[in-house]
Image: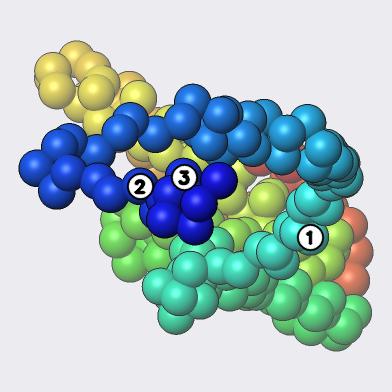
Amino acid sequence: MSDTTPRPDETPTDPTAPPPPPAPEAAAPEAAAPEAATAEAPLAPPAPAPAEQPYPTPPPPAAYEQPQDAQQHPPYYAQQSPPQYAPQAAPLTPSEERTWGMLSHVVGGGAMVLSGGFLGFVGSLVIYLMYKDRGPFVRAHAANSLNVQITAGIGFLIGWLLTITIIGALIGIPILIAVFIWAVVVHIIGAVKANNGEWWTPPMTPQFIK
């Protein structure tokens, strides 16, 4: 073989000829590369499951606080002051009981005389209401004086009704005089008894008040 024979790698090529297609073996390694990479790559460990969180502890209940308006304006019952009771009157001494027992007869009889028999019960009633709870002795004599006035008032009413007619006047007028004298005498006796400290019940007198 002569030296002028061209070697295979020195074979002249036609510049106008299209390039030869790439060899199929060259693309196979590239395509198989991802598969090999995936086959050879180790699997990633699974992500750990999140730890179970305990239930959150509820916050402690807040202390009860009254609204600001309620603090500035307390309830109505809190504004009221407790009821004030009047102190009970002190009991009378024995001498005071005798004095007021006597005055219950004197005032009642005097008012009856001055008013013609119409207002005698007022004096007896006032003393009875004022002193009936301050001693048993003054209560008894004031009640007797008031009973005398009630009985006398009934007698006066009957006497005045009988004086409307002429025939009735013959009975009515003596009744008025008799009732008047009886009431005056009984009040005088009652005043003396009370002043002496004696318990006494007036005669012919119903016990309307005790």
Residue at left offset 50%, top offset 33%: 27
As drawn, the label of residue 8 is 3
Would you name the residue on which mark 2 appears? 11
* Relative image position of residue 200 (x, y in whole percent): 84, 53
Quadrant of the rendering where the C terminus is positioned: top right
Classify residue 135 by image quadrant: bottom right
The answer to whether residue 109 is seen in the rendering is: no
Element at label 3: helix
Element at label 2: loop
Q: Earlier in the sequence, mark 2 or mark 1?
A: 2
* Relative image position of residue 62 (x, y in whole percent): 70, 64
Check disc 1: other Cα within 10 Å, few if <14, some if 14-19, many if 20+. few
Residue at left offset 58%, top offset 74%: 81
> Are circles 3 and 1 on residues that touch, CB within 8 Å?
no
Taking depth in this image into account, of 114 and 52 the one nearest to the observer is 52
Q: Is residue 140 left or right of residue 117?
A: right
Query: Mark 1 is on which residue type?
Result: Pro
Spatial CA distance of label 2 from label 3 is: 5 Å
Check disc 2: other Cα within 10 Å, few if <14, some if 14-19, many if 20+. few
Spatial CA distance of label 3 from label 1 is: 95 Å
Q: Earlier in the sequence, mark 3 or mark 1?
A: 3
Q: Is residue 31 left or right of residue 102?
A: left
> Are circles 2 and 3 on residues that touch, CB within 8 Å?
yes
In this rendering, the label closer to the viewer, 3 or 1: 3
Colour scheme in use: rainbow
Residue at left offset 30%, top offset 55%: 116
Element at label 1: loop
Would you name the residue on which mark 1 appears? 60
* Relative image position of residue 178 (x, y in whole percent): 46, 40
Taking depth in this image into account, of 14 and 2 the one nearest to the observer is 2
The answer to whether residue 63 is seen in the rendering is: yes
